[in-house]
Amino acid sequence: MSSLDVARAELALAVLYLNKAEARDKICRAIQYGSKFISDGQPGTAQNVEKSTSLARKVFRLLKFINDLHALISPSPQGTPLPLVLLGKSKNALLSTFLFLDQIVWLGRSGIYKNKERAELIGRVSLFCWMGSSICSVLVEIGELGRLSASMKKLERELKNSDKHQDERYRAKVKNSNERSLALIKAGLDIVVAVGLLQLSPKKVTPRVTGACGFVSSLISCYQLLPSPAKSKLS
């Protein structure tokens, strides 16, 4: 493969990635929280970038609550324990509520919705919903990782006379475990971000801590949305 073919393939991946509204939203989120980290809550250029990017991101999320509403009423994968099903549905309900209320916050910040006090109250309620959905995500990932660990140990016993790393089923479980571990870290960081935005612990979770956690969480989201080369070739 020539260097031109390599460049074309890499650009095709970049186009595929940037065509996703979710990817653009997460890139903007990284800029938003990176600016928050730099500003440390102090007025200036970085804080202006944070505020303008935060407002712009809300447009990307218009009607996005439908996604989690659909997930809420969709059947769960067969064999999932009832506690994990309930936690997953709670996460969908809370995240859908957050995204719906966030649209009212956008209307308030845009000057369309005139009741500023109510818009601020709705904004706090929406953040509590987001924090609740992140807590549910942490619990779901912990539960799923526990299930994966048990199934991997069972598979290891079956493959004790062979190289487990050559087995497709074992490699798939390892990949799934890594993905869920990353999702667990991201959800944990999002809880800290929500605590910072709600100012529940202002002395410990400062604007700089909030910005750092939000920036790392955003980078994880950007990584999770990366298309695989195999998928890009098929498309």
Image: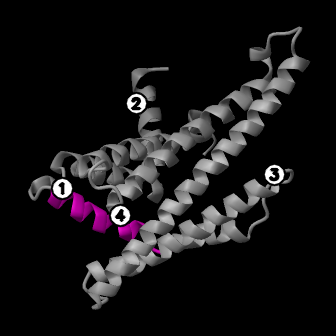
Sequence-wise first label, 1 or 2:
2
Real-space Cα distance between discs 1 and 4? 14 Å
Q: Which residue is mark 4?
A: 198
Real-space Cα distance between discs 1 and 2? 41 Å
Q: Which residue is mark 2?
A: 7
Q: Is residue 194 left or right of residue 34?
A: right
Q: Nearer the viewer, residue 55 or 94?
A: 94
Residue type pointed to by label 4? Leu
Residue 111 position, x and y percent, is: 25, 85
Residue type pointed to by label 2? Ala
Residue at disc 2, secondary structure: helix
Q: Is residue 24 visible?
A: no
Q: Which mark is residue 41?
A: 1
Residue 113 position, x and y percent, is: 31, 89
Relative height, residue 143 to residue 194 (above, below) = above
Give the label, 3 or 4, closer to the camera.
Answer: 4
Q: Nearer the viewer, residue 115 or 226?
A: 115
Give the label, 3 or 2, closer to the camera.
Answer: 3
Q: Is residue 167 left or right of residue 15?
A: right
Mark 3 neighbour class, 10 Å CA radius: few under 14, some 14 to 19, many 20 or more: few
Place residue 41 in its image quadrant: bottom left
Place residue 167 in its image quadrant: top right
Sequence-wise first label, 4 or 2:
2
Q: Which mark is residue 80?
A: 3
* Region in magenta: 47-63
